[in-house]
Image (cartoon, rainbow, N blue to C red):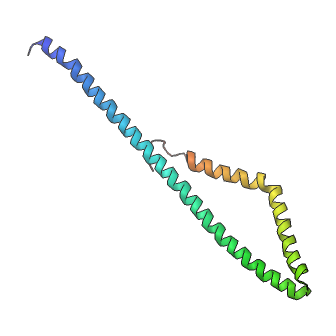
Amino acid sequence: MSQSEISSSKPSHIIESLRDDVESLVHDQISLLQLKLTKKVAQVISLVAAVLLLSFLGFCIVVTLSIIGGYYLVQTTGSFYTGVGIIAGIYLLIFLALMAIRKKYFQTSIANIIIRLLFDATGKNKNDVN
């Protein structure tokens, strides 16, 4: 082969090779993004599932204790309305207290947990899949 034949075939081969490399890089970046997104979605779903399960169990416990406490207060006070009213008053006080502190303690901490999950603030290398 002469020098002119080599130089004329090289640029097309280099361009084709470069195009293949760019396609491979784009495909790999898309795959990596899919893996990272799948990981984040799985973390959020598992957190939501755990919170829902614990909330349901807590709700069952609170309802059971409320029934027991209400029955005890009905027996102690001798009046159904007084016993149940005391339990309702306790729940009203708890509700008002939670409404007063919800922004300071609950909304901020929940937002921080979600931000940490979504933006992985652990200081790991951003290129890590783990």
What residue occupies the far front of the structure in this picture?
81
Q: Residue at x 8, y 16 (%)?
A: 1
Query: Which of 40 and 78 lies nearest the eye of the viewer?
Result: 78
Q: Which residue is drawn at 73% across and 75% down?
A: 63
Picture residue at 85% right of the left edge, 66% below the top: 92
Outermost residue, top side:
4
Residue sitting nearer the eye, 108 or 3: 108
Q: Which one is nearer the viewer's eye here, 10 or 80?
A: 80
User: Is residue 6 shown above or below 23?
Assistant: above
Q: Position of residue 87 (x, y in %)?
A: 84, 75
Q: Is residue 53 above or below residue 17?
A: below
Q: Quick check: 4 left or right of 65? A: left
| Extreme residue in the left direction | 1
Q: In this view, does 106 lie above or below 115?
A: below
What is the count of numbered marks? 0
Q: Residue at x 72, y 79 (%)?
A: 64
Left or right: 111 as drawn, with respect to 68: left
Q: x, y percentage for residue 120?
A: 55, 47
Where's residue 77, x and y in %? Answer: 91, 85
- Residue 68, x across and y down, in percent: 77, 83
Relative to 116, does residue 27 appear above or below in the rendering? above
Q: In this view, does 71 lie to the left or right of 32?
A: right
